[in-house]
Image (spheres, helix red, strand yellow):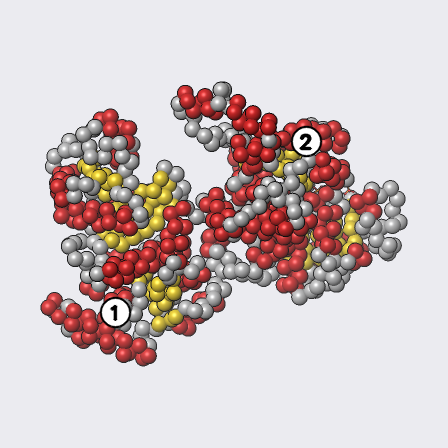
Amino acid sequence: MAKITKEAALLYHSQGKPGKIEVVPTKPYSTQTDLSLAYSPGVAEPCLEIEKNALTAYDYTAKGNLVAVISNGTAVLGLGDIGAMAGKPVMEGKGLLFKIYGGIDVFDIEVNEKDPEKFIEAVKAIAPTFGGINLEDIKAPECFEIEKRLKAELDIPVMHDDQHGTAIISSAGLLNALEVAGKKIEDVKIVVNGAGAAAVSCTKLYIALGARLENIVMLDSKGVISTERTNLDESKKFFATSRTDIHTLAEAIKDADVFLGLSKGNILSQDMVRSMANNPIVFACANPIPEITYEDALAARPDVLMSTGRSDYPNQINNVIGFPYIFRGALDTRASAINEEMKLAAVKAIADLAKLPIPEIVNKVYNVTNLSFGPEYFIPKPVDPRLITEVSMAVAKAAMESGVARKPIEDWDAYKKHLRELMGYESKLTSQLYDTARTDPKKVVFAEGGHPNMLKAAVEAKNEGICHPILLGNEERIEKLAKEYDLHLDGIEIVNLRHDSQAERRDRYAHILAEKRAREGANYDEATDKMFERNYFGMMMVETGEADAFITGLYTKYSNTIKVAKEVIGIQEGYKHFGTMHILNSKKGTYFLADTLINRHPDTETLTDIARLSAKTVRFFNQTPVMAMLSYSNFGSDPVGSPAKVHDAVKQMQEAYPDLAIDGEMQVNFAMDKKLRDAKYPFTKLFGKDVNTLIFPNLSSANSSYKLIQAMNDSELIGPIQMGLNKPIHFTDSESSVRDIVNITAVAVIDAIVAEKTKNAK
Ligand SMILES: NC(=O)C1=CN([C@@H]2O[C@H](COP(=O)(O)OP(=O)(O)OC[C@H]3O[C@@H](n4cnc5c(N)ncnc54)[C@H](OP(=O)(O)O)[C@@H]3O)[C@@H](O)[C@H]2O)C=CC1
Ligand SMILES: CC(=O)C(=O)O
Ligand SMILES: [Mg+2]
């Protein structure tokens, strides 16, 4: 990870619109009517409803998804009391994190008030605005009283995140690190450096989880907190040790199993780490500089289990792994509080998640291939897309079971789906595809079982319940890969097509193929050779009905795969050409793009085949095709060359299918903008209609367009979806991600379901 310089940090915050967050309207506002609804006179109606029944504020305002991140700036990170305004970048940062990880909106509120009583009054006065309150960077011991009072006096969840967020994450980390170290929480000696908001709360939660108070030594800026010391405040007195032989950190840490630092940077030396017990656990959580650096701790003790608060090292202990989801679960149940039950549920959910095989996206973000539970990975990564579902659902359940929920969640599957959609992890179309495939999971052959992405996709597709995978490849290699990536192959068939055990199958397939292509010069010997190739063998499995669908393409060029597909499977009756489609899921809507991969320079006949196949495919996805045939000219304005071919194809399509909404040739902006098109070309067959299908004039334009969209990285593309072959044979390409392959698998399964239904209906 790049080193963060002062200049880069200041530039990041100042460039463009200064700061990190802004307010975005969620309702239409382009007409006079919209404005009359948004503000006076329309706005009076919800006001009156809320006046009658306060809870309707959740229905008519943003309250239910709005959290206040409130600070007085007295303990900003490890920077100390830098004042309310100086803490604003941190609070805006939390706003950003709440939004990107939990879909929660935040107003950051910096209150210039150190007096706890006045601070409490200020927070209470503004509380009606919010569904929850995240207190942040308020120093101990005032923070304890402030939180206690606000929790008691407000009916919305209030959580001081430096206390409880940190406690939840570090407890999950501790439980897992202890498991890796092979130690029990009730036996370990724990040294806690720092006795502030975070340290006190973390240590109390460790005790709730089984740690023994007599095994804990806590230190503040003056050294070990012991019964010898006078004038200790209540929160520190609770931890005072009766030992009188230790006063400094160096003395306290000798033989300790666990070091928890929530204090200041650079105060734990390598010698101190060396003096700890075997497999020491060191959580150096001060921000931005930890008590000891990751490198120094590891250099001192190779057996150390190490965490810091920083994202650039393994095992980050940072409350970002918790607060977006703890508040998500609390807000979604309209909880009146965040209680102990909800916190413990979050600990468990976070700890458990680190033990599951991790999704590909996490590997990708960290540029690694095989994170798995162990010394370098015992806390989930903040980017893990499962945190939103696992932690929020656990918290919501605990809120309901402990009686603080005011709006129970009734359908957990629907809630899970909603959470994934909220974060854009699952578009509606993708989840519909998966749901449909799940109704009748089919046998899908994966041609390149020895390719890591295809192997991962096959396992994921099986876990999603969308297919029964059959992997082609060498068993040993596949099993070795599976071990390397911590993938479970139970219930997945592996077929080594070159093995002797497949001789009968190869022979049988060769006979069938030779017979089928006898009039095209095929012979048995040649066909026998071909059966040693994965694409021939795999497609024959589908051709013979021994499997239902086939996915290939990671190792083979399209041109080669296409050739084999035409030979083994053949093109559907009534067509001379086949093609591929990509589905674009964007904020503007869903669009079907063709032909994105197969036909380089389509002539009029090829274009009509692509258009017919596309119409059929769009209907396959339960939509009515509204098709624009694209070019660089409009409706004959350039009567020669490529536009002329498109023009002719449109004419033929309109004659053959008078009910189909299809027109062109037209430029892409006229296809995408109904108003523009209707104003300038009111005669089109698409008048008043939103185009959803774009047929490109050639492969260069289609391929470049979808790759450009892909590079923009802000929409989802599903594809390539094969159109026009006799059986569900689908292609990926060498750059396909695991997610791309699983999506195509879902499409292939649906394709197979439809093929079976059509066959049965005949
Ligand atoms: N990684 C994470 O998720 C989180 C990290 N933190 C980090 O924890 C630290 C403390 O934050 P917070 O609890 O909110 O702040 P507080 O101001 O409430 O507490 C700071 C504590 O650190 C103690 N301290 C200061 N210097 C030393 C020292 N040299 N040796 C021992 N103790 C010392 C202070 O002692 P005294 O009581 O004597 O003043 C005080 O008890 C910060 O660095 C913060 O960034 C906090 C929350 C989350
Ligand atoms: C992470 C955090 O909240 C802190 O360092 O204060
Ligand atoms: Mg903080």
Seen in the image, is 582 located left or right of residue 650? right
Residue drawn at x 28%, y 28% is 675
Q: Distance between the residues labelled 2 and 1?
A: 71 Å
**What x and y, as percent, mark residue 597?**
25, 51
User: What residue is at 29 percent from the left and 40 percent from the top?
Assistant: 692
Amino acid bearing label 2:
Val
Label number found at residue 418:
none
Q: In this view, does 499 lie to the left or right of 165?
A: left
Q: In this view, does 476 lie to the left or right of 355?
A: left
x, y percent for residue 682: 21, 28
Res. 229 visible in picture: yes
SS for callout 2:
helix
Which numbered disc, 2 or 1, marks the residue that appears first in the sequence? Answer: 2
Please name the residue shown 48% across and 43% down the image: 422
Q: Quadrant of the C terminus?
A: bottom left
Residue identified by numbered label 2? 123
Look at 27% across and 28% down and name the residue there. Answer: 676
Q: Please tell me how crowded label 2 is: few (under 14), some (14-19), or many (20+) other residues with Cα within 10 Å.
A: many
Percent coordinates x, y for residue 205 in the rendering: 71, 52
Q: What's the residue type where badge 1 is placed? A: Thr
Q: Which label sits on residue 544?
A: 1
